[in-house]
Image: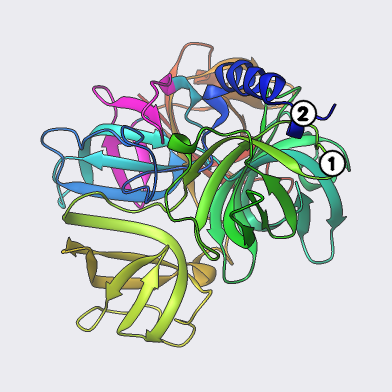
Amino acid sequence: MSTLHNPTRRQALFTATGLAAAALLSACGGGGSDAGSPAGANPATPAGASTYTLGAITGFGSVIVGGVRFDDSRAECVDEDGNARDRSLLKLGMVVAIDAGAVNRADASALALRIRLGSEVVGPVGTVDSAASTVQVLGQTVLVTSSTLFDETLAGGFAALTPGRVVEVHGILDPVNARIVATRIEAEDSPAAYKLRGQIANLDSTAKTFTINGQPVSYTGLPAATVPPGLTNGQIVRVLLQTTQVNGAWVAIALRGGLRLPDRSGEAHLEGVITSFTSTASFSLNGLPVDATNASFPDGTTGVEIGARVEVEGTVVGGVLVATKVEIEERRVQFRRQLELRGELGNLNTTDKTFALRGVTVWYGGTVEWRDGIEATLANGKRVEVKGVLAADRTRLEARRIDFK
Protein backbone atom coordinates (compact mmCIF):
# COMPACT_ATOMS: atom_id res chain seq x y z
CA MET A 1 0.00 0.00 0.00
CA SER A 2 1.35 3.47 -0.85
CA THR A 3 2.45 5.93 1.83
CA LEU A 4 -0.16 8.42 0.62
CA HIS A 5 -2.97 6.02 1.51
CA ASN A 6 -1.57 4.47 4.68
CA PRO A 7 -2.26 6.89 7.59
CA THR A 8 -0.30 4.89 10.17
CA ARG A 9 2.84 4.63 8.10
CA ARG A 10 2.38 8.17 6.85
CA GLN A 11 2.22 9.57 10.40
CA ALA A 12 5.24 7.49 11.44
CA LEU A 13 7.19 8.87 8.51
CA PHE A 14 6.07 12.39 9.39
CA THR A 15 7.28 12.02 12.97
CA ALA A 16 10.56 10.22 12.31
CA THR A 17 11.60 12.18 9.25
CA GLY A 18 10.43 15.46 10.76
CA LEU A 19 12.56 14.96 13.86
CA ALA A 20 15.59 13.84 11.90
CA ALA A 21 15.29 16.75 9.49
CA ALA A 22 14.15 19.54 11.80
CA ALA A 23 17.39 21.38 11.21
CA LEU A 24 16.82 21.21 7.48
CA LEU A 25 13.56 23.12 7.34
CA SER A 26 15.32 26.41 6.74
CA ALA A 27 13.96 27.37 3.35
CA CYS A 28 12.93 30.86 4.40
CA GLY A 29 16.40 32.17 5.09
CA GLY A 30 15.03 34.88 7.30
CA GLY A 31 11.94 35.55 9.12
CA GLY A 32 9.61 38.15 10.25
CA SER A 33 5.95 37.59 9.79
CA ASP A 34 5.55 34.15 8.30
CA ALA A 35 1.96 34.62 7.25
CA GLY A 36 -0.13 31.58 8.05
CA SER A 37 2.49 29.76 10.10
CA PRO A 38 1.34 27.88 13.19
CA ALA A 39 1.58 29.67 16.48
CA GLY A 40 5.10 29.78 17.82
CA ALA A 41 6.78 29.40 14.43
CA ASN A 42 8.24 32.88 14.78
CA PRO A 43 9.53 33.88 18.22
CA ALA A 44 9.00 37.37 19.58
CA THR A 45 11.39 40.11 18.49
CA PRO A 46 14.36 40.31 20.89
CA ALA A 47 14.21 43.13 23.42
CA GLY A 48 16.20 46.12 22.24
CA ALA A 49 15.92 45.31 18.54
CA SER A 50 15.27 48.41 16.44
CA THR A 51 16.62 47.43 13.02
CA TYR A 52 15.95 44.60 10.60
CA THR A 53 18.33 43.57 7.83
CA LEU A 54 17.81 40.89 5.20
CA GLY A 55 20.60 40.01 2.78
CA ALA A 56 23.57 37.86 1.89
CA ILE A 57 26.58 37.58 4.19
CA THR A 58 29.56 39.29 2.52
CA GLY A 59 32.09 39.06 5.32
CA PHE A 60 33.07 37.86 8.77
CA GLY A 61 34.93 39.18 11.77
CA SER A 62 31.63 40.55 12.66
CA VAL A 63 28.84 39.31 10.38
CA ILE A 64 28.71 41.74 7.45
CA VAL A 65 25.40 42.18 5.65
CA GLY A 66 24.30 45.15 3.58
CA GLY A 67 27.56 46.97 4.33
CA VAL A 68 26.95 46.89 8.08
CA ARG A 69 29.19 45.04 10.56
CA PHE A 70 26.99 43.20 13.02
CA ASP A 71 28.69 42.18 16.27
CA ASP A 72 27.32 38.66 16.72
CA SER A 73 29.09 37.88 20.00
CA ARG A 74 25.81 38.02 21.94
CA ALA A 75 23.38 37.08 19.19
CA GLU A 76 21.22 34.00 19.24
CA CYS A 77 21.30 32.06 16.00
CA VAL A 78 18.06 30.34 14.94
CA ASP A 79 16.31 28.94 11.91
CA GLU A 80 13.07 30.51 10.72
CA ASP A 81 11.02 28.37 13.12
CA GLY A 82 13.04 29.61 16.09
CA ASN A 83 15.09 26.44 16.61
CA ALA A 84 18.54 27.20 18.03
CA ARG A 85 21.41 26.76 15.60
CA ASP A 86 25.17 27.04 16.06
CA ARG A 87 26.75 30.27 14.77
CA SER A 88 29.46 28.18 13.13
CA LEU A 89 26.86 27.29 10.50
CA LEU A 90 26.92 30.84 9.16
CA LYS A 91 28.81 30.96 5.86
CA LEU A 92 29.65 33.49 3.17
CA GLY A 93 26.77 33.93 0.75
CA MET A 94 24.04 32.74 3.09
CA VAL A 95 20.97 34.97 3.14
CA VAL A 96 20.11 35.85 6.73
CA ALA A 97 17.70 38.09 8.61
CA ILE A 98 19.25 40.06 11.46
CA ASP A 99 17.38 41.74 14.30
CA ALA A 100 19.76 44.27 15.82
CA GLY A 101 20.11 47.42 17.83
CA ALA A 102 20.53 50.83 16.24
CA VAL A 103 23.12 51.14 13.48
CA ASN A 104 26.07 53.41 14.26
CA ARG A 105 26.32 55.34 11.00
CA ALA A 106 29.82 56.61 11.79
CA ASP A 107 31.36 53.15 11.40
CA ALA A 108 28.41 51.19 9.92
CA SER A 109 28.17 48.82 12.88
CA ALA A 110 25.44 47.41 15.09
CA LEU A 111 24.90 44.82 17.81
CA ALA A 112 23.10 41.76 16.44
CA LEU A 113 20.54 40.26 18.82
CA ARG A 114 19.19 37.47 16.63
CA ILE A 115 20.33 35.98 13.32
CA ARG A 116 17.92 33.80 11.36
CA LEU A 117 19.34 31.55 8.66
CA GLY A 118 17.94 29.27 6.04
CA SER A 119 18.02 28.31 2.37
CA GLU A 120 15.67 28.16 -0.60
CA VAL A 121 15.87 24.59 -1.87
CA VAL A 122 17.52 21.25 -1.09
CA GLY A 123 17.29 18.57 -3.73
CA PRO A 124 18.86 16.81 -6.70
CA VAL A 125 20.34 18.64 -9.66
CA GLY A 126 18.48 18.22 -12.93
CA THR A 127 19.15 20.01 -16.21
CA VAL A 128 22.27 22.18 -16.29
CA ASP A 129 22.40 25.05 -18.82
CA SER A 130 25.88 26.56 -18.76
CA ALA A 131 25.03 29.04 -21.53
CA ALA A 132 22.16 30.51 -19.52
CA SER A 133 24.04 29.98 -16.23
CA THR A 134 21.08 28.15 -14.76
CA VAL A 135 20.54 24.78 -13.12
CA GLN A 136 17.39 22.91 -12.17
CA VAL A 137 17.29 21.82 -8.51
CA LEU A 138 14.23 19.81 -7.48
CA GLY A 139 12.56 21.25 -10.57
CA GLN A 140 13.30 24.86 -9.58
CA THR A 141 15.28 27.15 -11.88
CA VAL A 142 18.37 28.45 -10.09
CA LEU A 143 20.24 31.39 -11.62
CA VAL A 144 23.98 31.37 -10.93
CA THR A 145 25.57 34.84 -11.08
CA SER A 146 29.10 36.18 -10.91
CA SER A 147 28.66 36.65 -7.16
CA THR A 148 27.28 33.17 -6.40
CA LEU A 149 29.66 31.46 -3.99
CA PHE A 150 30.24 27.71 -4.27
CA ASP A 151 31.23 25.75 -1.18
CA GLU A 152 34.50 23.86 -1.46
CA THR A 153 32.47 20.65 -1.45
CA LEU A 154 31.70 21.59 -5.06
CA ALA A 155 35.23 21.66 -6.47
CA GLY A 156 35.17 23.39 -9.84
CA GLY A 157 32.11 25.47 -9.01
CA PHE A 158 29.44 25.39 -11.71
CA ALA A 159 31.10 22.40 -13.38
CA ALA A 160 30.45 20.35 -10.24
CA LEU A 161 26.67 20.70 -10.64
CA THR A 162 26.08 17.33 -12.25
CA PRO A 163 22.63 15.73 -12.68
CA GLY A 164 21.57 13.73 -9.64
CA ARG A 165 23.90 15.44 -7.20
CA VAL A 166 22.02 16.80 -4.17
CA VAL A 167 22.74 20.43 -3.31
CA GLU A 168 21.48 23.17 -1.02
CA VAL A 169 20.86 26.58 -2.55
CA HIS A 170 20.86 29.83 -0.59
CA GLY A 171 19.58 32.92 -2.32
CA ILE A 172 16.65 35.13 -3.16
CA LEU A 173 13.32 33.81 -4.36
CA ASP A 174 12.14 35.54 -7.54
CA PRO A 175 8.54 34.36 -8.02
CA VAL A 176 7.94 36.84 -10.83
CA ASN A 177 10.53 35.12 -13.02
CA ALA A 178 9.92 31.68 -11.43
CA ARG A 179 13.52 31.28 -10.28
CA ILE A 180 15.93 31.48 -7.37
CA VAL A 181 18.86 33.87 -7.63
CA ALA A 182 21.62 31.89 -5.93
CA THR A 183 24.01 33.53 -3.49
CA ARG A 184 25.57 30.28 -2.21
CA ILE A 185 25.45 26.63 -3.30
CA GLU A 186 26.82 23.68 -1.33
CA ALA A 187 26.68 19.88 -1.59
CA GLU A 188 24.28 17.97 0.65
CA ASP A 189 25.18 14.32 1.08
CA SER A 190 22.27 12.05 2.06
CA PRO A 191 19.93 14.75 3.47
CA ALA A 192 17.13 13.55 5.74
CA ALA A 193 14.66 15.58 3.70
CA TYR A 194 14.36 17.84 0.67
CA LYS A 195 12.84 21.28 0.84
CA LEU A 196 11.28 23.96 -1.34
CA ARG A 197 10.17 27.54 -1.01
CA GLY A 198 7.99 28.96 -3.73
CA GLN A 199 4.61 29.99 -5.03
CA ILE A 200 1.59 27.69 -4.87
CA ALA A 201 -0.25 26.84 -8.08
CA ASN A 202 -2.94 24.30 -9.02
CA LEU A 203 -4.15 24.07 -5.43
CA ASP A 204 -6.68 21.31 -4.76
CA SER A 205 -7.78 21.73 -1.16
CA THR A 206 -9.88 18.58 -1.31
CA ALA A 207 -7.12 16.29 -2.55
CA LYS A 208 -4.64 18.39 -0.54
CA THR A 209 -2.21 18.87 -3.41
CA PHE A 210 -0.54 21.78 -5.17
CA THR A 211 2.44 22.46 -7.38
CA ILE A 212 5.47 24.71 -7.01
CA ASN A 213 6.90 25.54 -10.43
CA GLY A 214 5.48 22.31 -11.80
CA GLN A 215 6.59 20.06 -8.94
CA PRO A 216 3.57 18.22 -7.48
CA VAL A 217 3.29 18.27 -3.68
CA SER A 218 0.86 16.29 -1.51
CA TYR A 219 0.18 17.43 2.05
CA THR A 220 -2.40 14.75 2.86
CA GLY A 221 -0.29 13.43 5.74
CA LEU A 222 -0.06 16.70 7.65
CA PRO A 223 -2.21 17.32 10.74
CA ALA A 224 -4.69 20.11 9.96
CA ALA A 225 -3.31 22.26 12.79
CA THR A 226 0.11 22.38 11.09
CA VAL A 227 -1.20 23.59 7.71
CA PRO A 228 -1.30 27.37 7.19
CA PRO A 229 -4.97 28.39 7.14
CA GLY A 230 -6.46 29.78 3.97
CA LEU A 231 -3.99 28.30 1.49
CA THR A 232 -4.45 29.91 -1.90
CA ASN A 233 -2.87 29.95 -5.32
CA GLY A 234 -0.09 32.50 -5.50
CA GLN A 235 0.82 32.15 -1.82
CA ILE A 236 4.50 31.74 -0.97
CA VAL A 237 5.16 28.68 1.19
CA ARG A 238 8.11 26.65 2.39
CA VAL A 239 7.78 22.90 2.58
CA LEU A 240 9.86 20.00 3.85
CA LEU A 241 9.58 16.85 1.73
CA GLN A 242 10.33 13.17 1.84
CA THR A 243 13.26 12.39 -0.44
CA THR A 244 11.31 9.99 -2.64
CA GLN A 245 8.09 10.66 -4.51
CA VAL A 246 4.93 8.63 -3.92
CA ASN A 247 2.47 8.19 -6.80
CA GLY A 248 4.36 10.87 -8.71
CA ALA A 249 4.14 13.53 -6.00
CA TRP A 250 6.52 14.87 -3.37
CA VAL A 251 5.16 14.15 0.11
CA ALA A 252 5.16 17.10 2.52
CA ILE A 253 6.22 16.46 6.10
CA ALA A 254 6.02 20.14 7.14
CA LEU A 255 4.42 23.20 5.59
CA ARG A 256 4.77 26.88 6.52
CA GLY A 257 4.09 30.30 5.08
CA GLY A 258 7.18 31.46 3.21
CA LEU A 259 7.23 35.25 3.11
CA ARG A 260 10.29 36.95 4.60
CA LEU A 261 8.96 40.09 6.23
CA PRO A 262 9.94 42.27 9.21
CA ASP A 263 7.69 41.52 12.18
CA ARG A 264 7.75 45.03 13.61
CA SER A 265 8.12 48.69 12.71
CA GLY A 266 11.56 50.24 12.65
CA GLU A 267 14.62 50.78 10.51
CA ALA A 268 15.08 48.19 7.76
CA HIS A 269 17.50 47.25 4.98
CA LEU A 270 16.21 44.56 2.63
CA GLU A 271 17.64 42.83 -0.41
CA GLY A 272 15.16 41.12 -2.68
CA VAL A 273 12.97 41.17 -5.76
CA ILE A 274 10.20 43.55 -6.77
CA THR A 275 7.15 41.29 -6.66
CA SER A 276 4.51 43.84 -7.66
CA PHE A 277 4.88 47.24 -9.31
CA THR A 278 2.70 50.31 -9.72
CA SER A 279 5.44 52.90 -10.20
CA THR A 280 8.97 53.62 -9.03
CA ALA A 281 7.34 55.30 -6.04
CA SER A 282 5.05 52.39 -5.21
CA PHE A 283 5.97 48.72 -5.42
CA SER A 284 6.43 45.62 -3.26
CA LEU A 285 9.73 44.01 -2.25
CA ASN A 286 9.53 40.33 -1.29
CA GLY A 287 5.81 40.95 -0.77
CA LEU A 288 6.36 43.98 1.51
CA PRO A 289 4.74 47.25 0.29
CA VAL A 290 7.31 50.00 -0.40
CA ASP A 291 6.66 53.75 -0.52
CA ALA A 292 9.62 55.23 -2.41
CA THR A 293 8.08 58.65 -2.99
CA ASN A 294 10.95 60.47 -1.25
CA ALA A 295 13.69 57.90 -1.82
CA SER A 296 17.00 58.50 -3.58
CA PHE A 297 17.90 56.28 -6.55
CA PRO A 298 21.72 56.22 -6.84
CA ASP A 299 21.50 53.97 -9.91
CA GLY A 300 18.61 55.90 -11.46
CA THR A 301 15.05 54.66 -11.81
CA THR A 302 15.47 52.87 -15.14
CA GLY A 303 15.34 49.18 -14.38
CA VAL A 304 13.28 49.58 -11.21
CA GLU A 305 10.48 47.32 -12.40
CA ILE A 306 8.68 44.10 -11.57
CA GLY A 307 11.14 41.22 -11.20
CA ALA A 308 14.14 43.50 -10.63
CA ARG A 309 16.56 42.65 -7.83
CA VAL A 310 17.05 45.66 -5.57
CA GLU A 311 18.24 46.78 -2.15
CA VAL A 312 16.01 49.16 -0.22
CA GLU A 313 16.76 51.12 2.93
CA GLY A 314 14.14 52.88 5.01
CA THR A 315 11.75 52.51 7.91
CA VAL A 316 8.85 50.11 8.30
CA VAL A 317 5.76 52.05 9.38
CA GLY A 318 2.41 50.30 9.66
CA GLY A 319 3.52 47.40 7.48
CA VAL A 320 4.93 49.64 4.74
CA LEU A 321 8.63 50.18 4.06
CA VAL A 322 9.06 53.94 3.65
CA ALA A 323 12.20 53.98 1.54
CA THR A 324 15.06 56.46 1.79
CA LYS A 325 17.26 54.72 -0.82
CA VAL A 326 16.69 52.22 -3.62
CA GLU A 327 19.65 50.55 -5.35
CA ILE A 328 19.55 48.19 -8.34
CA GLU A 329 21.39 45.05 -7.31
CA GLU A 330 21.85 43.68 -10.85
CA ARG A 331 24.13 46.60 -11.70
CA ARG A 332 26.23 46.08 -8.61
CA VAL A 333 26.83 42.34 -9.16
CA GLN A 334 28.03 42.84 -12.74
CA PHE A 335 31.38 43.43 -11.06
CA ARG A 336 33.01 41.08 -8.60
CA ARG A 337 31.88 42.17 -5.15
CA GLN A 338 34.56 42.58 -2.51
CA LEU A 339 34.31 40.15 0.38
CA GLU A 340 35.96 40.38 3.78
CA LEU A 341 37.14 37.83 6.34
CA ARG A 342 38.76 38.27 9.73
CA GLY A 343 40.12 35.66 12.12
CA GLU A 344 42.94 33.18 12.75
CA LEU A 345 44.34 31.59 9.62
CA GLY A 346 45.10 27.89 9.34
CA ASN A 347 46.20 25.23 6.84
CA LEU A 348 48.89 27.55 5.48
CA ASN A 349 50.35 26.21 2.22
CA THR A 350 53.27 28.38 1.12
CA THR A 351 53.71 26.39 -2.09
CA ASP A 352 50.13 26.87 -3.33
CA LYS A 353 49.96 30.25 -1.54
CA THR A 354 46.72 29.44 0.23
CA PHE A 355 45.38 29.33 3.75
CA ALA A 356 42.02 28.68 5.41
CA LEU A 357 40.04 31.43 7.10
CA ARG A 358 36.48 31.18 8.43
CA GLY A 359 35.88 28.05 6.37
CA VAL A 360 37.07 29.65 3.14
CA THR A 361 40.27 28.99 1.20
CA VAL A 362 42.17 32.23 0.59
CA TRP A 363 44.68 32.47 -2.28
CA TYR A 364 47.36 35.14 -1.91
CA GLY A 365 49.38 34.44 -5.05
CA GLY A 366 48.20 37.52 -6.95
CA THR A 367 48.78 41.21 -6.34
CA VAL A 368 48.28 41.73 -2.62
CA GLU A 369 48.58 44.86 -0.51
CA TRP A 370 50.21 43.87 2.78
CA ARG A 371 49.64 45.89 5.96
CA ASP A 372 51.53 45.59 9.25
CA GLY A 373 53.43 42.62 7.89
CA ILE A 374 54.63 40.87 4.74
CA GLU A 375 54.03 37.52 3.11
CA ALA A 376 56.72 35.93 5.28
CA THR A 377 54.73 37.01 8.37
CA LEU A 378 51.98 34.52 7.54
CA ALA A 379 51.78 31.64 10.01
CA ASN A 380 49.09 29.34 11.30
CA GLY A 381 47.28 31.01 14.18
CA LYS A 382 48.04 34.56 12.99
CA ARG A 383 45.07 36.89 13.09
CA VAL A 384 44.45 38.61 9.79
CA GLU A 385 41.84 40.58 7.94
CA VAL A 386 41.53 39.69 4.26
CA LYS A 387 39.71 41.65 1.59
CA GLY A 388 39.32 40.13 -1.83
CA VAL A 389 37.07 38.82 -4.57
CA LEU A 390 35.79 35.42 -5.62
CA ALA A 391 38.04 33.38 -7.90
CA ALA A 392 36.79 32.44 -11.35
CA ASP A 393 35.34 29.14 -10.10
CA ARG A 394 33.82 30.99 -7.09
CA THR A 395 35.01 28.43 -4.54
CA ARG A 396 37.81 30.49 -2.96
CA LEU A 397 38.76 34.06 -2.17
CA GLU A 398 41.52 35.85 -4.07
CA ALA A 399 43.16 38.23 -1.60
CA ARG A 400 43.64 41.84 -2.60
CA ARG A 401 44.65 43.13 0.82
CA ILE A 402 45.85 41.34 3.96
CA ASP A 403 46.09 43.16 7.30
CA PHE A 404 47.82 41.56 10.27
CA LYS A 405 45.97 42.11 13.55
Q: Nearer the viewer, residue 400 or 369?
A: 400
The image quadrant where one finds the N terminus is top right
Q: Secondary structure at mark 2?
A: helix
Rendered position, 114 above or below 162: above
The residue sitting at 27% across, 71% down in the picture is 325
Q: Is residue 300 visible?
A: no
Q: Nearer the viewer, residue 342 or 3?
A: 3
Rendered position, 305 above or below 129: below
Q: Rounded to the nearest whole Å, what is the CA distance between mark 1 and mark 2?
A: 9 Å
Mark 1 near mark 2, Cβ–Cβ under 8 Å? no
Q: Which residues are magenta?
A: 62-87
**Mark 1 vs 2, N-terminal side:** 2
The residue sitting at 36% across, 26% down in the picture is 77
Please give the residue where the numbered disc 2 appears in the rendered image. Answer: 3
Q: Residues within 10 Å of mark 2 (few under 14, many from 20)?
A: some
Please give the residue where the numbered disc 1 appears in the rendered image. Answer: 247
